[in-house]
Amino acid sequence: MAEDAPSAGAEGSHAASAEGAAAAPAAKVAAEALLPSLSIWPPSQRTRDAVVRRLVQTLAAPSVLSQRYGAVPEAEAERAAADVEAEAYAAVSDSSGAAPASVEDGIEVLQAYSKEVSRRLLELAKSRAAAAAAPAAGGASESEAAAPAPAEE
C-alpha cells in the first residue's frame, strides 16, 4: 500500500500537468473566438468623429502646426477637418478594397488612414499659409512667400 502512495502522487502530478496542457489550447481557442469580434477597420463613426475633433484642435488651438503655419478660425477648421478626414477615409477605403482579412491587415489599413489624414492636414496648413502670405508678400516671389519660417531650436 505504501508503494501505491508514491505512484498515486506521480499520477496526480501527471494528471495536473495534462489538465494544464489541455487548458492552454482551450484558452487559445477562446481568445481566437474573440478576435473576429475585434474590428480595427473600418473605424466606428464615433472614432471618426474623434479624429475630426482632434484635427479641429490641431488647426484652431495652439499646436506645433498652428504655430508654424498659422491658426485657422474654428468654423473654418471644423469644415476643413471634416473634409480632410472624409477624403482620407475614402482614399484608404478605395485603395484597401474589401474588409481586411485579419487584425494585422486591419492595423495596416488603419496606419495608412492615419498617415493619409496627417499628410492631408499638413498640405492644408501649408496651402493656407501660402495663400495668406501671397497677398502680404506683395512683390516677393511665390517661393519666398511660401517658405516656412525656420524652426526654433
Image (spheres, helix red, strand yellow):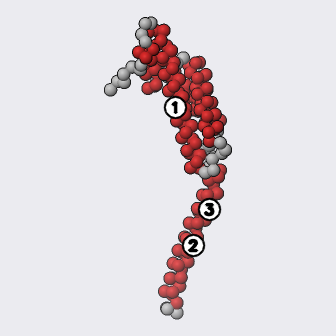
Where residue 113 sits in the image (x, y, percent)? 57, 37
Instruction: Give the residue type at disc 3.
Output: Val
Residue at which label 1 appears:
118
Where residue 68 sits in the image (x, y, percent)? 43, 22
Residue at which label 3 appears:
29
- Residue 52 visible in the shown view: yes
- Disc 1/disc 3 C-alpha distance (Å): 38 Å
- Disc 2/disc 3 C-alpha distance (Å): 15 Å
Residue at which label 2 appears:
19
Among the two numbered marks 1 and 3 on one chain, the one whose residue lies closer to the N terminus: 3
Instruction: Give the residue type at disc 2.
Output: Glu
Query: How many other residues sit within 10 Å of disc 3, few (<14), some (14-19) or many (≥20)?
Result: few
- Please identify, in this view, whether the residue under mark 1 or under mark 2 is nearer the observer: 1
Q: Is residue 151 left or right of residue 52?
A: left
Q: Name the image quarter holding residue 16.
A: bottom right
Residue most extreme to the left: 153
